[in-house]
Image (cartoon, grey):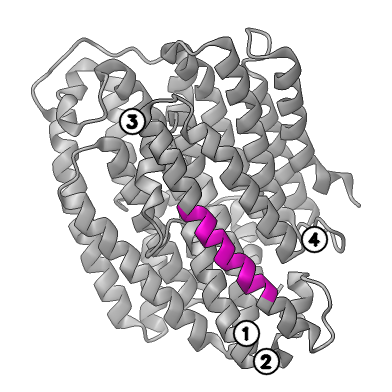
Amino acid sequence: MNPLVIAPVAVPLAAAALYAVFGWRRGTAWLGALAAAGLLACAIALAVVGDTGAGPLRADALSAYMLIVIGAVALLAMLAGPAYLAAEQAGHRAMRRYGVLTQMFIAAMALAVLASSLGMLWVAIEATTILTAFLVGHRRTRQATEAAWKYVVICSVGIALALLGIVLLHYAGAHVGVSSLDWAALSQHAARLDPGVTRLAIVLLVLGFGTKAGLAPLHAWLPDAHSQAPAPVSALMSGVLLSVAFYAILRIKVISDGALGVGFARLLLVIVALASLAVAALLLIGQRDYKRMLAYSSIEHMGVVALGAAIGGPLALAAVLLHILGHGLGKSVLFLSSGHLLHASGSSAIDAVRGLAARAPLLAGVFGLGLMALLGLPPFSLFASEVGIARAGLAAGLGWPVAVALLLMLIIVAAVGRHARGMILGERQGEAIAVPPTAATALVAGLAACALLGITTGPLRSLLQAAAAVAGGTP
């Protein structure tokens, strides 16, 4: 096996082992950032090298692209981690546990996008549930513990549905001579799979992995978990874990399109996409907690991604992948900013934060521009990706789902804008908020990258096109 394929998993695991042995101290505090930078470098190298061929771990253009997303968001989160934990005044034991669990979490996500087997992919995503449950309950308050249990229960239901779907898909494959769960082999022989069994399997898999992606109807864990987790963990969960779960749906969709035609998965994804957008719009209108506001925004964006995947085609899928990266960068910046707001105000209530522009101009600018990015305003990449999805939808004859989605997104813009106006421009309340230099660097860098991608994809253009081709079933 190519060592370069193993490295994205091995690097964060090595960092986790070092945290377990040496703990969290001045000499190891930045180890997570170094490991994330190493993972990002490996992802870029894999993108340059191209398809690595056969093996239990395999990297094609889609896998390499998702590794870049994981590495970029992890780097931002790990750069902000030391300052966040110092402000929380966490004990050395809690900090050691945080270092070990976050690195194992990143390794599990890397394993998920490199796995050549649906079985290994399922195991990796299940591992993220176990690891992040402890991170959600990091503060050990009553609210954090309840959120962790809710997260475990709902995601366990979802992952059980996905497991049943994999069993049925294996049954269908075994009857046509595909004895393994290799997604490439299943895609190759998809036309021979039993339609009835495959149809049930696809429904279970979309619902199961959709639960972990934050899609309706099993989305209820997301606002509680993201609002209680430490800010860097929320950045990882919202910015990249949801997208890793949706990556599994993209792989499943290729099999579904080959076995059942494009119409079945398209209808299923359109339903969950519009349901997710509707849930987000309705619950954002009266939202009073800014961390939960960001969490419901994640449900919205996963709905947009699902709509783009339903549309299919090179333009829509390239826009979906660009949206995944833009959302990861923008949402990580916002959750990291929310951590500083929480430490300064002592509350996650929207009414507790007023006059942010006067108290902390840098933080206000980053938070306001981050919200602009997530609302799909130019020059940020989410504007370009949402326009691309809308154009592709109209060209594919899906005008009515696109129109409904745009209407719901307009409601979300109005709701979030109303909440943000008071937070940023309201009458000043409280003392000035200082942002440590390393954390400020991470915030500005993430926002700048999101804006740059909205202007030009640059060297990512060819990788985006190749990854979109893989997601469309034409590697």
Which badge, 4 or 3, is on the more N-terminal residue?
A: 4
The amino acid at mark 4 is Asp
Give the prevailing secondary structure in the magenta stretch.
Answer: helix
| Contact check, label 4 and label 3, Cβ < 8 Å | no
Q: Which residue extends farthest left?
A: 427
Report the amino acid beneath label 3.
Val
User: Disc 2 or disc 3, which is closer to the eye?
Assistant: 2
Vertical side of 122 occupied by 313: above or below: below
Classed neighbour count for the residue bearing mark 3: other residues with Cα under 10 Å, few (<14), some (14–19), many (≥20): many
The residue carrying mark 3 is 366
Q: Which residue is mark 2?
A: 194
Element type where label 1 sits in the image: helix
Q: Nearer the viewer, residue 445 or 84?
A: 84
Question: Which stretch appears magenta?
Answer: 154-167
Label drawn at residue 404: none
On the rendered structure, is 121 left or right of 227?
A: right
Q: Label 4: which residue? A: 51
Q: Is residue 246 above or below residue 36?
A: below
Three-letter code, disc 2: Asp
